Image (tube, rainbow, N blue to C red):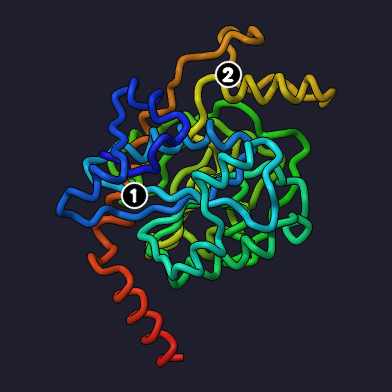
Amino acid sequence: MPIKVAQNLQGICELEKEGIFAMEAGRAESQDIRPLRLAILNLMPNKEVTEKQLLRLIANSPLQVEVVFLRTGSYESKNTNSDYLTNFYKTFDDIIKQNQKFDGLIITGAPVERMAFASVEYWEELSSIFKWAEKNVYSSLYICWAAQAAMYYHYGVHKKEVSKKIFGLFNHKVLMPQNPILRGFDSEFIAPHSRHTDVAIDDCKKFVDILATSSDAGLYLAASTDLRKVFIFGHGEYDNDTLHLEYIRDKQKGIKQDKPKNYYIKNKEGVVPPITWRAHQSLLFSNWINYCVYQRTPFNLTNYLEEKNNLKATLT
């Protein structure tokens, strides 16, 4: 898929070397089609790395997608250059002022999982984004902490801290192979997890379909029945060395942490494995874009969402 991005976005050259087609705005606008519009609220500290990881997955489709990166306005990232954020990211306020609507929204994880949701500095802003997305986005995909936050905001499902960090590569079983999000999946697949908190499957299944779980890592994938909300509780977007880099980072901070499970080759620290999870994660993103966004969102998204919201207001 040609992904339409801002000119000179960090990491595009590296993705192009992998055979991923990134189309700059001028060329994309010359094509007589309406690209899907995806917003990505990037809450991860190293935003450039997360950009590449997500764009790599989004590119696994024949559709043209325009990607708009968002950042929080109520909290300033300490790990990304402010000029870079100004040049390549919009704030939620920018989107509101321009009355923008999107076919899809992705919200990443964030290293705040041990904090109570209300204590997170940008929780009020994130809550506003959740509320805004209900009326201005067709389908939203939430990753790791964002998945827990969305489950709490929309359904009141609380997260709980686990005794030992869920950290490593884990096997998962597909529970609803008939669901479009899982179309083409093998019965079992591998995916990374890195989190100190968890949500109870029994609590979640009252509100959403449980699509894939792990006997060791718990819930991995869930979705609302109408596919307008998709929850990924792991980190399938991770590179092969991401868990290693997190492990070394924590060790340097003096944090006691076991080595990531099922990860290092022969359990030798630093000997990172080949990627064995990208194919399924690429398929997951491709299925989300195709079945949850492209085949459901109307050509004129603005008119559709406005009409739907007016109808809902009338009925209530």
Q: Position of residue 307 (x, y in %)?
A: 33, 81
Residue 249 appears in which quarter of the rendering? top right
Would you say the residues marked 1 and 2 are in contact, meaning their CB atoms lie under 8 Å apart? no
Does residue 44 appear left or right of residue 54 in this picture?
Answer: right
Q: Amino acid at mark 1?
A: Glu
Alpha-carbon span between mark 1 and mark 2:
35 Å
Task: Please say if 36 is above or below 49.
Answer: below
Residue in front for this viewpoint, 220 or 240: 240
Residue 144 appears in which quarter of the rendering? top right
Q: Secondary structure at mark 2?
A: loop
Q: Which mark is residue 66?
A: 1
Residue 139 visible at all: yes
From the image, which quarter does the N terminus lie in?
A: top left
Residue at (40%, 43%) from the top-left corner? 6
Does residue 111 appear left or right of residue 136 in this picture?
Answer: right
Task: Please say if 236 is above or below 258.
Answer: below
Q: Which mark is residue 263?
A: 2
Residue at (29%, 38%) from the top-left corner? 23
Q: Position of residue 132 (x, y in %)?
A: 51, 69
Residue at the limit of the structure toward the right, as seen here:
254
Residue in front for this viewpoint, 37 or 135: 37
Of circles 1 and 2, the one toward us is 1
Residue in front for this viewpoint, 48 or 208: 48
Q: Amino acid at mark 2?
A: Tyr
Residue at the limit of the structure toward the left, as seen here:
32
Residue at (34%, 49%) from the top-left corner? 66
Marker count (numbered): 2
Q: Earlier in the sequence, mark 1 or mark 2?
A: 1
Residue 53 visible at all: no
